[in-house]
Amino acid sequence: MKKCLRIKGLAALSLILSVGFTACDSTENNGKTNRVITFEDVPLDSTGVWNGNDLSGDSTHYALFVEYEGGFTSGILYAHNTWNETWGSWSGMACSNHTDRETAGYENQYSVFDISGADGSEQFVVLYPSDTATCSFASPVDIQAVSVNNATYAYLAIKEGNDGYTMQTQFEEGDYFILTITGLDENGTETGSINYYLADFRDGKTYVCDDWTQVDLSTLGKIKSLGFSLSSSDMGLWGMNTPGYACIDNLVYQ
């Protein structure tokens, strides 16, 4: 087995911006105003997490369980979330301030593998897509960029093979873990998609994203919503062996 080496990642695609810690900051870029969704305005309780367990969403009663479809707002962005009251589980998007980089496994599912949110902020979004995690803007925007990073749960499973259980999840030559970001216009039509490798062990590489990295989304154009999905080369009978978590912060738009 090829040992995983911690290395700094691919050079980030950069845009010029200055990020503050309010709901939405702004700068000028080529005569247009860059605005930033920072997620600092999302109320968190004493747990440091919003995951839908406040039952603020719309409930649906199924034969075996009850689900709440809802979400949270930051600036002009609405992040969608599903909370399963019966099972005490969630999917979609949650907001967190957890930065535990040491604890492996599901109990640490809300931590980013960094010491803070992007650019030293306190809060960020945790993605856990059952299929695709989505967020939508109040009106169409020209999307510019987003900062991404691995969740600690996924990072330790990929780099050290430690997912808190007994799965053999350490990456070997040829493995990869991809975050796919898809833009949709106000009619729900896809405007394009971008893949970012949160881990890449192809062609002799041993890259595992371990800090906030800005990804250029400008080719997606004018969008009304974004979808985030995860895929891995490490698959089992029940889907991905790689924990299906990632983190985002600082959505830049015009």
Image: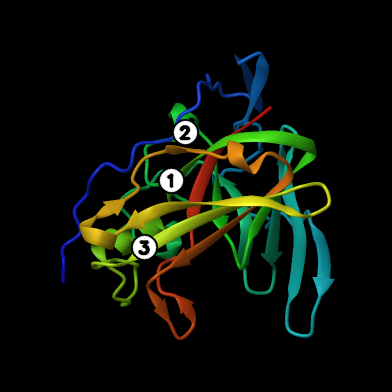
Please name the residue that numbered disc 1 is placed on.
149
| x and y percentages locating residue 166 in the rendered image | 31, 77
**Above or below for 167 versus 253:** below
Disc 3 to disc 1: CB gap under 8 Å: no
Q: Residue at 53% x, 21% y: name it.
A: 17
- The residue tagged with tag 3: helix, strand or loop? strand
Q: Nearer the viewer, mark 3 or mark 2?
A: 3
Foreground: 137 or 243? 137
Query: What residue is pinned by disc 2?
Result: 118
User: Which comes sooner in the sequence, label 3 or label 1?
Assistant: 1
What residue did someone put label 3 on?
176
Q: Hey, which quadrant is residue 45 in on the image?
A: top right
Q: Position of residue 120 (x, y in %)?
A: 44, 28
Q: Is residue 249 or residue 116 the one in the foreground?
A: 249
Amino acid type of disc 1? Asn
Residue 68 visible here: yes
In whole angstroms, how far apart are the C-alphas of marks 3 and 1?
Answer: 15 Å
Q: Residue 182's spot in the image, x, y percent?
A: 62, 52
Task: Point out the tag, 1 or 2, that comes first from the N-terminus.
Answer: 2
The kind of residue tagged 3 is Tyr
Amino acid type at circle 2 is Ala
For the C terminus, give its image quadrant: top right
Would you identify the image quadrant in which residue 212 lies? top left
Q: Do the residues under discs 1 and 2 have CB atoms within 8 angstroms?
A: yes
Q: Between 204 and 152, which is closer to the camera in this rendering?
A: 204
Q: What is the CA distance from the residue labelled 1 to the residue labelled 2?
A: 9 Å
Is the C-beta separation of discs 3 and 2 under 8 Å? no
Residue 237 lies, with reference to residue 46, above or below; the image says below
Label 2 crowd bin: few (<14), some (14–19), many (20+), radius 10 Å = many
**Secondary structure state at the residue bearing disc 2:** helix
